[in-house]
Amino acid sequence: MANTDSDPQTFVEMVLTLLEDRFPWLGTDRDASGSETVDELNELHRTLRTAKRAARRQQRNRRKR
């Protein structure tokens, strides 16, 4: 989910990109496997939790300076 544009993404753009990357069948008539969807959602949750922890660490480190 790399932002290749020079302009920062809005929150909505970021979430849409993330969803489209993880769930390419969204917005199509293509069927999705239930177990595959659950696995993808678990991976998405894990990724977001990791990013949240990293952001908090960065924020704390900035305050200490």
Image (tube, rainbow, N blue to C red):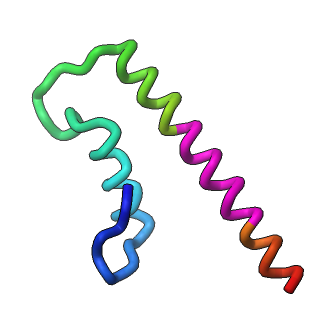
Count of numbered tags: 0
* Quarter of the figure that contains the N terminus: bottom left
* Quarter of the figure that contains the C terminus: bottom right
* Residue 8 to residue 46: above or below: below
Quadrant of res 28: top left
Residue at the outermost left position: 29
Q: Which residues are magenta?
A: 45-57
Taking the spot 35% from the left edge, 45% from the top edge, the residue there is 19
Q: Position of residue 61 (x, y in %)?
A: 81, 74
* Residue 46 to residue 57: above or below: above
Q: Is residue 62 magenta?
A: no
Q: Position of residue 64 (x, y in %)?
A: 88, 80
Taking the spot 82% from the left edge, 71% from the top edge, the residue there is 60
Q: Is residue 55 magenta?
A: yes
* Residue 40 to residue 44: above or below: above
Taking the spot 13% from the left edge, 25% from the top edge, the residue there is 30
Q: Locate residue 29 relative to residue 57 in the image: left or right.
A: left
* Residue 33 to residue 3: above or below: above
